[in-house]
Image: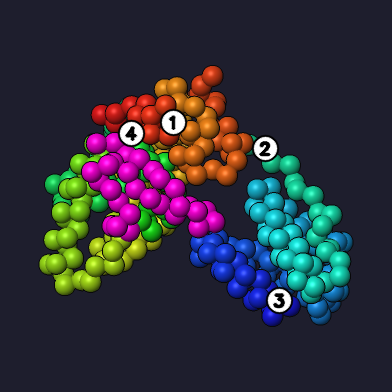
């Protein structure tokens, strides 16, 4: 079964899916295959729907959202196996998703965002990176991977826009405010001096760690929570909550739901509708509705 899994992973990589996405799919499916192997399945043809349901039942200690993600990964794997002729029957075809109750969307108000920015002491030069990052997430709605993979040549400061690569390797345009552009300018000056003074090679990424490498997402979220504590804003804050705050602010100020969908890079408008808890031009005009951060 390892051979079939490896071949499927190669097919995902050929579609230029993000490395993290592929790794997640692979981990999900490997867990299911290991469960089935422990119960006597020596090959894919010995796995049936009952065995897969038993695997999913064993995950009941996890959230419904996590179980559904693992089930979706398994269904994609077995569907591919059937399409490639590795299986005569797809044992995952009859699996049904677990009902998920949608949690309340958390976001920062404009006032809380201003407090968060005030907590970042740019008297220490490298913290211009942190200020620029908070403003970037709050005014572009980018996912964390999209920001940390952003390359210098994809940034258009004179146009206040950039091209990021979203889920499924799909590029999209994002826009940022003049205030964010100014913070970026300060950070890029610090960035150049930091690399030069330490003799570090330039990897071409906009946002870097002190070691001149791609920023570790977990480390960044810890940094963000530290600023949240200093600012006195909720410590449930994460980079993704800044994305929520971006969408919420746009919709509160009258942006069209479809435009916000495109700005966020959602494949379906249903994903964007979670932000309509706050509210009853085209993409750039919609972005201009974003209020100043203070």
Colour mode of the rendering? rainbow
Residue drawn at (42%, 26%) of the image = 281
Front label number (3 vs 4): 3
Residue drawn at (87%, 61%) of the image = 50
Q: Nearer the viewer, residue 59 or 167?
A: 167
Q: Is residue 204 left or right of residue 62?
A: left
Q: Which residue is mark 1?
A: 282
Going from N to C along the chain, the mark reached first, 3 or 1, is 3
* Magenta stretch bounds: 151-178
Residue 77, image x and y in percent?
Answer: 71, 65
Against 290, residue 50 (above or below) is below
Q: Is residue 177 magenta?
A: yes
Q: What whole-number distance in Å separates the C-alpha atoms at marks 3 and 4?
A: 48 Å
Residue 60, image x and y in percent?
Answer: 73, 53
Q: Which residue is mark 2?
A: 101
Front label number (3 vs 1): 1
Q: Quadrant of residue 193?
A: bottom left
Going from N to C along the chain, the mark reached first, 2 or 1, is 2
Question: How packed is label 1: few (under 14 Cα within 10 Å), some, or many (20 or more)?
Answer: few
Q: Which residue is mark 3?
A: 4
Q: Which mark is residue 113?
A: 4
């Amino acid at each position: 079964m390892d051979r079939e899994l490896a071949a499927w992973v190669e097919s995902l990589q050929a579609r230029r899916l993000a490395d993290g996405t592929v790794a997640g799919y692979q981990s999900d499916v490997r867990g299911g295959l290991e469960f089935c192997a422990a119960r006597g399945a020596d090959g894919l043809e010995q796995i049936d729907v009952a065995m897969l349901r038993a695997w999913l039942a064993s995950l009941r200690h996890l959230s419904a959202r996590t179980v559904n993600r693992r089930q979706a990964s398994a269904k994609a794997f077995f569907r591919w196996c059937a399409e490639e002729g590795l299986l005569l029957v797809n044992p995952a075809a009859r699996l049904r998703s677990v009902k998920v109750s949608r949690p309340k969307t958390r976001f920062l108000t404009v006032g809380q965002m201003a407090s968060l920015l005030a907590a970042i002491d740019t008297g220490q030069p490298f913290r211009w990176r942190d200020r620029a990052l908070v403003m970037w997430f709050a005014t572009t709605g980018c996912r964390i991977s999209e920001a940390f993979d952003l390359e210098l040549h994809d940034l258009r400061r004179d146009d206040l826009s950039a091209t990021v690569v979203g889920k499924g390797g799909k590029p999209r345009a994002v826009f940022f405010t003049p205030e964010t552009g100014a913070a970026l300018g300060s950070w890029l000056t610090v960035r150049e001096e930091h690399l030069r003074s330490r003799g570090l090679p330039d990897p071409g990424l906009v946002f870097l760690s002190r070691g001149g490498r791609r920023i570790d997402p977990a480390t960044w979220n810890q940094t963000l929570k530290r600023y949240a504590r200093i600012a006195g804003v909720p410590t449930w804050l994460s980079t993704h909550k800044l994305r929520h705050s971006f969408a919420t602010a746009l919709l509160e100020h009258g942006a069209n739901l479809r435009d916000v969908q495109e700005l966020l890079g959602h494949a379906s408008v249903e994903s964007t509708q979670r932000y309509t808890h706050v509210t009853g031009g085209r993409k750039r005009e919609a972005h201009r509705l974003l209020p100043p951060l203070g």
